[in-house]
Amino acid sequence: MPEKIVRTRFAPSPTGFQHVGGIRTALFAWLLARQNKGHFILRLEDTDKVREVEGSADHLVKSLHWLGLEWDEGFDKGGQFAPYKQSDRLESYKLWAQKLIKSGRAYADPYTQEEVDGFRKDCEAKKKPFLFRDHRPDNPPKWDGSQPLRFKSDPKDRTWHDAVMGDMHSGAEANDDFVLIKTDGYPTYNFAHIVDDAEMDISHVIRTQEFVSSTPRFLDLYEALGLKQPVLATLPFVMAIDGKKKLSKRDGAKDVLDYAKMGILPETMLNFLASLGWNDGTEQEIFSPQELIKKFSLERVQTSPARFDEQRLHWMNGMHIRALDQDELMKLCSDYWPNEAKDAGEDYKKQVLGLVSERLKLLSELGELTSFFFADPNVDDKLKGLILGETKLEASKAKKFLEVSIKTVESSDFSVDKL
RNA sequence: GGUCCCAUCUUCUAACGGUUAGGAAUCCAGGUUCUCAUCCUGGCAAUAGGAGUUCGAUUCUCCUUGGGAUCACCA
């Protein structure tokens, strides 16, 4: 039997920029696909029209391009299972929904929003967990799209295997009747991603921990739809610097392209993100993208969360900068020269770069590190006046200026305290 | 509150049930380099707590504690 081809996907929703946590998920999915000569698919999960942010898709494409995480099929370039944008796939979801209705596994939710909220509050007051299925209507109306379509869950104990987390289990409480199709006609994530993964023949679903608690529902849905479940791989969170919360935009996570602006190299970012939750078991710390592809394995992914430590990122960037040859570095630096250097010749700049490349951690440091190579220093007139009694500094006087300065410094008590 | 996940230095992490618990970032002390940086040497620093299994537990089991996630017509 031929080994099934590995097909992984990255499926963000267009709600703004990509932060490094999301990118790490993309990276691991990409690594797995590349390692197995499989396909990496970029899908856009744009079913929440309220949260959608203009320009997100372009920004996403730009971010992945910068990192070199190229995809084989995607919402912007098509492919065998196009379209790859959920809002273009509504017919598919309706078809699968009809199947569920026919088999008695989906029903129209007859309640108003207020009624459901009432049920919920009731349970809260009684300190009981709220389960929609306790309010399942006996004779639901025929679904006409004006009501939410709900999944009729099959609550039971479930066990499953996660390629990273190992054996997992959950009780029947984890299953409930969730919404499949909203009243705006769009499917929910819970429904849409299952349908898409199946139709796009995704072999490995890689995502972060927040979905663990919904996994029993996904399993329920696979069963009801008669679909084979893909390999599930759950990644630990990338935590914010303070280590208290998963990294998120709300708590100040940075746009991955901000790191590009700072002069973090893409290979540094990939290396660093890979090191957050994965290592090859040796003491090697610096990996090229090619080495990552070769050595990555889901089995060696951690189960515990890691913090995003920028200090370590900067160190790693220095290591990657030093691994470049001067010509490559020269090319990358082109946007980072100080204003003073705009009239300087390439050869001169190259020499300057040679002098500072050893100490560069971020390309954006190039300006302050080199500006004095391109401009005469600005000597404070007041200081000159103080020492020489005059403010004009000609070549003949410069020597005297320095001599006096040295004497002044030497004769003073040049100690930390005095300073 | 229900359900679920997690737990080694400050941080990222290594350790077939047997190691003086290793490496890396940071910090400190030296050395090399006319400065800085690079580089080299050394140092500080951890198995959350308690039971159990075992000749032996960072590793397996249970409890406690702590942290996190999720309980939406968001993903």
Image: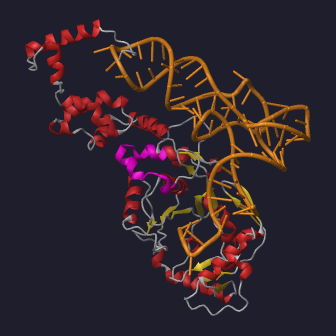
As for residue A144 lying within the magenta part, the answer is: no
Q: Which residues are magenta?
A: A248-271
From the image, which quarter does the N terminus of chain A lie in? bottom right
- Number of marks in picture: 0
Give the left or right position of residue A158, taking residue A409 as reference.
Answer: right
Say whether residue A352 is left or right of residue A316: left
The correct choice, above or below, for A214 with respect to A368 in the image is below
The x and y percentages for residue A271 are 49, 44
Q: Residue at x 29, y 37 (%)?
A: A327
Q: Quadrant of the C terminus of chain A?
A: top left
Residue A207 in picture, x, y percent from top left: 58, 59
- Is A387 situated left or right of A172 in this image? left
Report the colour scheme.
secondary structure
Answer above or below: position of B72 versus A277. below
**B9 in relation to A230, above or below:** above
Quick check: is A251 in the magenta stretch? yes
Q: State the predominant SS element of the stretch in magenta.
A: helix
Q: Quadrant of residue A109?
A: bottom right
Say which quarter of the image contains residue A202. Answer: bottom right
Choose between A1 and A84: the one closer to the eye. Answer: A84
Q: Is residue A312 visible?
A: yes
Q: Residue at x 59, y 81 (%)?
A: A113
Image point (29%, 40%), residue name: A333
**What is the x, y in percent for residue A210?**
61, 60
What residue is at 78 percent from the left and 68 percent from the top?
A157
Point out residue A279 in the picture as x, y percentages from the top left corner.
59, 42
The single residue placed furthest to the front in the displayed view is: A125
- Residue A223 appearing in the image: no
